[in-house]
Image (cartoon, helix red, strand yellow):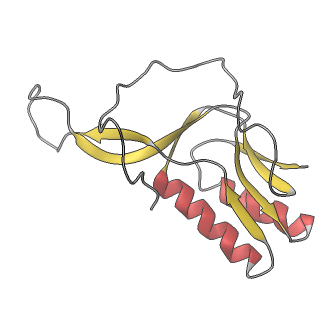
């Protein structure tokens, strides 16, 4: 699974939501011909990214190339079950990427458009955000 090798701060503050904002970076297809773009805002976990990547790999076999444009670098902490209130913040449980509407999540190249569309839509079902297929 994806996780940063080294982080400056092990635990981050939870920031207020950015409702109403749209992505200002990662909004265009740069590397491939087809892409998967988010249409809503949410956290995408490292497990969801890996599940989507596996779906894409299964579709392209050895014919194309995939680019993952997002990386989960935000730590999410959790306290154990039945732990009393207080006593500090919990340990880092997993990592997420905060997706904004308009963020390109994956890109593909080297396979027919119909096959790429089917693959990217299937990969989008594994994510916690609504997505749409786009092309360059």
* Residue at 72% in and 64% down: 66
Q: Is residue 72 above or below residue 117?
A: above
Q: Quadrant of residue 38?
A: top right
The residue at the point 91 percent across, 70 percent down is: 112
In percent of width and height, residue 12 lies at 34, 30
Location of residue 28 by image quarter: top right
Residue 58 image offset from top left, x and y in percent = 68, 76
Q: In this view, does 19 lie to the left or right of 64?
A: left
How many badges with numbers are in the image?
Answer: 0
- The correct choice, above or below, for 90 with respect to 53 in the image is above
Which corner quadrant holds the N terminus? bottom left
Residue 45: x and y, percent?
A: 48, 48
Q: Given the current orientation, which residue lies at the most extreme bottom position?
A: 62
Q: In the figure, is residue 74 to the left or right of 136?
A: left
Report the residue at 46% width, 18% height from top: 16
Give the residue displayed 8% in from the left and 29% down from the top: 87
Horizontal side of 89 relative to 44 (left or right) equals: left
């Amino acid at each position: 699974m994806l996780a940063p090798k080294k982080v400056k701060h092990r635990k981050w503050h939870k920031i207020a939501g950015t409702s109403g904002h749209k992505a200002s970076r990662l909004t265009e297809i740069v590397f491939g011909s087809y892409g998967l773009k988010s249409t809503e805002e949410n956290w995408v976990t490292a497990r969801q990214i890996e599940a989507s990547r596996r779906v894409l790999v299964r579709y392209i076999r050895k014919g194309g190339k995939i680019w993952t444009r997002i990386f989960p670098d935000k730590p999410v902490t959790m306290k154990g079950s039945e732990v009393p209130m207080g006593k500090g913040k919990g340990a880092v449980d997993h990592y997420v990427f905060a997706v904004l509407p308009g963020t390109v999540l994956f890109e593909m190249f080297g396979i027919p458009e119909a096959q790429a569309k089917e693959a990217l839509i299937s990969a989008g079902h594994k994510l916690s955000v609504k997505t749409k297929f786009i092309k360059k």
